Amino acid sequence: MKIKWCLIITLMLTVVLPHSVSAAGWGYKKNKGELPEVGKYQDMIEKHDGIFADLSGDKVVYLTFDNGYEAGYTPMVLDTLKKKNVPATFFVTGHYLNSAPELVQRMVKEGHIIGNHSWNHPDLTTLSQAKLEEELKRVDEKVAELTAQDSITFLRPPKGTFDDQSLQMTRELGYIHAFWSIAFVDWETDKQKGWEYAYNSVVDQLHPGAVILLHTVAKDNAEALEHLIDELHKQGYTFKSLDHLMMKKLLPFPVYGM
């Protein structure tokens, strides 16, 4: 009887917890001027072709933005990127696609990449394979409906939460997890501290190959962006797209002009 109940409990846990209980939130130890230390996470995500930085040592940076909802600052961000001829990747949710379709269209028209941030912003490690696929495919389909971008390669998991199984399942669906190596608390719209704070938060963490995560709901970020781009150019950095980073990872020879 004890063996029978153990089997039943095991089956129940398998149903309730479809993923490993070792789910993690992306994080790292800051290492001023150098690539942050990510420990065991590096091998874990690279096993599934995930990225968090350009490991080549080149003085290149990658701008990425998470767009869960529109707060009125994305047009300013896009204006600055256009003025400075800088590419970016925007990770969007279903809410953003439904509420700000004209901005998504503008992103693609101006040469930026749309990334997948899931439809409802759930913890991906808690989803079954069918539900996970539904969450991501709905974003793909809506982006293809609105824009000329007919597929999505890059996925940023909500809240940076992942485990080995979610990495594997999403890779099998054709997605590359795109984490980051520079970020700060910038999404609290009632606690903005001025553009200098946003500017310094990025510059203080700057390192070659950085993938920078910003949120477009922050007024500070929108106002700091032009100053930030100018400073990074002054320091000899070049801005590239995540497509460029993936080409560097996948090709066995240098990539020029991308």
Image (cartoon, grey):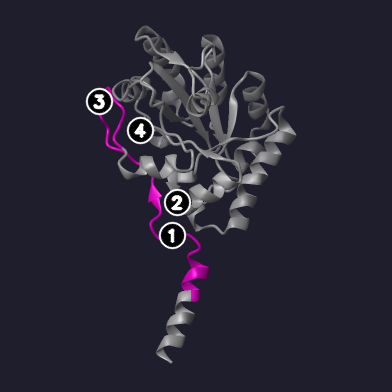
Whole-angstrom CA distance, mark 4 to mark 2, is 25 Å
Q: Please give the range of residues in magenta.
A: 11-37
**Residue 26: in sight, yes or no?**
no
Pinpoint residue 197: horizontal percent, then vertical percent: 32, 24
Asked if labels 1 and 2 touch by Cβ distance under 8 angstroms, the answer is yes
Residue identifier under label 4: 184
- Position of residue 174 in the picture relative to residue 252 (left or right): right
**Residue 79: in sight, yes or no?**
yes
- Amino acid type, mark 3: Lys
Give the residue at x 43% y 39%. Answer: 46
Say whether disc 2 or disc 3 marks the residue closer to the N-terminus.
3
Q: Splitting the image into 4 quarters, where does residue 243 fall?
A: top right
Give the residue at x 49% y 45%. Answer: 158
Pinpoint residue 209: horizontal percent, then vertical percent: 39, 23
Residue identifier under label 2: 164
Residue identifier under label 1: 20
Residue identifier under label 3: 32
Say whether disc 3 or disc 1 marks the residue closer to the N-terminus.
1
